[in-house]
Amino acid sequence: MTMTFTTNNTTLQDACYELSLRKRIPDADLLDEFVKHYPQFSTELTDFAISLALDALDPMGDVEESIKDSKKVTPAVSRAMSHFHNLLHTFQQEKSEPAPEVKSVQNADKEPTNPFKNLNRQEFREFAKRLNVNLVFVTKLRDRQIDPSSMSNGFIELIANDLPIHKDVLVAHLVGAQSAAPIARQFHKSDEKPSNSQQESFTKAVKNSGLSDEQQKQLLRL
Amino acid sequence: MARILTKVTEDGDLYTRPRQIELKIDAMLKLTDKKLSNQLDIGDPKSTAFLPSECLVYLIRDALRNGDNTKLNLILPVLLLRCERILIRKIQDQRITDKASLREDILCEFSGLFASDMNDKKVSKLDIFECRFNKAFKAFRLDKVEKELNRINNFMDLPQSYNHDNKELDDDILQHLSQAAKVPPNQESVLFMKDLLNEIKRLPPDVMKAVTLRYVIGFQIESNDPDETTVATICGCSSRTIRNRLKTAKTLLAHLMEDV
């Protein structure tokens, strides 16, 4: 089953939304109607109708559940907020004048190269998969929430080889000021600025990131 | 008064919000941040003071247009939390091992729609979320889940073939699906239905497709009318192949009948 639902393919997206609005479970007549209306998307619409139909059969249904603490910010919500702000900032930057060349050079002098900067979300996920760890752990790594002095050489080499960058560049990034990294601001309830004192040791980070026993052993063996 | 939506349906009509959503939005626009915050605390959808997600989408977009970061940071997390709860409840497919990452990806992409909303004036992707939020979010979610399943399927072993020659099979197990498509299951059959759906999602993709098209969506397996769309024409194979796939499904699902 293949379904592309990208911004370049608005018509398919519209068709899928419309199909989902028309009936709880699409029937043969409805799907036939849509496929005739959008013959170029016949396969995608059929696949979508199948997903829609099976989802609608779920006895748990679409009933909205009551939320006790409706303003609770969970880690996933916090990261989605962070993603939103980053994206919004990027779009706003694109609209405004490009920053002078000198400024970026000055910043480069002050801030060590961030080896994770050029990874998009998909690449970041793949990076986690290659390491056989979860996103929580690699996010801690990226956001300098793990004390680099507690990392084994084997682990640092593994990361450096995978990215691939020189070991020193990676270490320079990891020992950099934590506040420069996109940490989950919403969880910081203190009046003081976040500092490196919140860093976990490598062992603690391995244990507190929801990794399986096997994944933990693999990392601690490095 | 709530701003008019700009997205049009396939018939060329403008999308419109339900009347009660329009009324709620108008009322919310008059509230101070403090009162709005209090109203956002209400998490029970049955309460008359509960703010439907359609309203939240409107208010977030409104805050973005006005550069009102206070309101934006007040409302967006509430909507995202509701979405996360939906994702936790609905993403149960056992083939997806890292459900938390998938949920997070979907939430991030959804939050990204708001960020790009101001940037992309031609396409009002979020208009539909102001009309029927749950249905629109379902379509959004299903697309992402489907992509993840495609990725997983690429790494799965090919299913073994089944010999049906000596097996006597009945339609009962799959008729449950047809029945559930017409009438929502009662309390007694909810657990069975949940198990059945889980098993169906684990069938080989071509088998699952044939089962759903035949028993849930309701296409005929074949037809004498060459213009009629059937399961066989959709799947691009013979009716015999489709029957074999349905038999495979019945064989693989037969163990569920023992519990009925």
Image: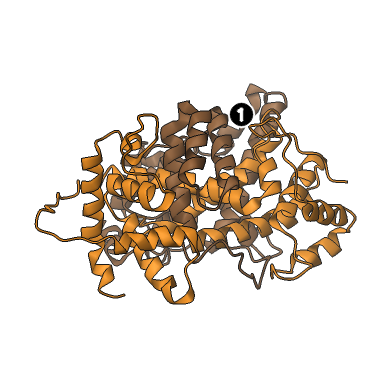
Viewer-proximal residue, A4 or B14? Answer: B14
Residue for point 25% across, 40% down: B239
Disc 1 residue type (three-letter): Ser
Q: Residue at x 80, y 42 (%)?
A: B67
Q: Nearer the viewer, residue B239 or B146?
A: B239
Quarter of the picture containing the C terminus of chain B is bottom left
Who's orange, chain-wise? B
* Other-residue count near label 1 (Cα within 10 Å), few / some / many at <14 / 14–19 / ≥20: few
**Residue at 46%, 51% in the rendered image:** A53
Instruction: Reply above or below: A180 against A6.
Output: below
Q: How many marks?
A: 1
Camera-side residue of B145 and B165: B165
Chain letter of the residue beneath label 1 in the structure image = A
Eyeballing the image, is A164 above or below B136?
above
Q: Position of residue A180 (x, y in %)?
A: 59, 46
Give the secondary structure at mark 1: helix
- Residue A95: image x %, image y %? 71, 27
- State the residue position of label 1: A104
Where is residue A55 shown, x and y percent of the image? 47, 55
Position of A169 with respect to B17 (left or right) is left
Residue A4: x percent and y percent?
Answer: 46, 34
- Vertical relation: A100 (above or below) B47: above
Colour of the chain lettered A: brown
Say whether residue A45 is left or right of residue A101: left
